[in-house]
Image (tube, rainbow, N blue to C red):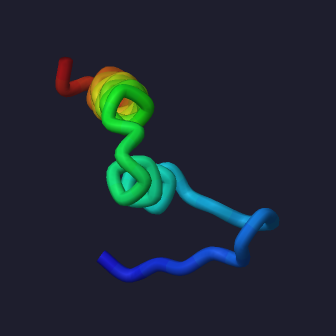
Amino acid sequence: MLGGNISGRTNTISLEVYNSVFTGEYDRALVLVILLAAVSLILILFTRRMAGEF
């Protein structure tokens, strides 16, 4: 994975997960991972439904 952020200005969920783990905020990292997985699953199901595969 390749990424970067300008501190306090830009960020991505994956970098926020990394920062949360790095600072010991494991509960926050878990919530972000669950959120990211849920959004990904919804988008996959939506795309498959729109393509007529589901």
**50 vs 15, nearest the viewer:** 15
Q: Position of residue 35 (x, y in %)?
A: 41, 27
Q: Identify the residue shown where x is 63% and y is 75%.
A: 5
- Left or right: 6, with 31 as reference point: right
Task: Determine the residue located farthest toward the left in the rendered image.
Answer: 53
Rendered image quadrant of residue 45: top left
Above/below status of 34 relative to 29: above
Give the number of marks.
0
Q: Identify the residue shown where x is 71% and y is 72%.
A: 7
- Left or right: 22, with 48 as reference point: right
Above/below status of 15 relative to 52: below
Task: Determine the residue located farthest toward the front in the rendered image.
Answer: 24
| Figure quadrant of the N terminus | bottom left
- Left or right: 8, with 29 as reference point: right
Q: Position of residue 8 (x, y in %)?
A: 78, 64
Above/below status of 22 relative to 45: below
Above/below status of 4 relative to 9: below
**2 vs 17, nearest the viewer:** 17
Q: Identify the residue shown where x is 29% and y is 28%.
A: 41
**27 vs 2, nearest the viewer:** 27
Q: Position of residue 11 (x, y in %)?
A: 63, 61
Task: Determine the residue located farthest toward the right in the rendered image.
Answer: 9
| Figure quadrant of the C terminus | top left
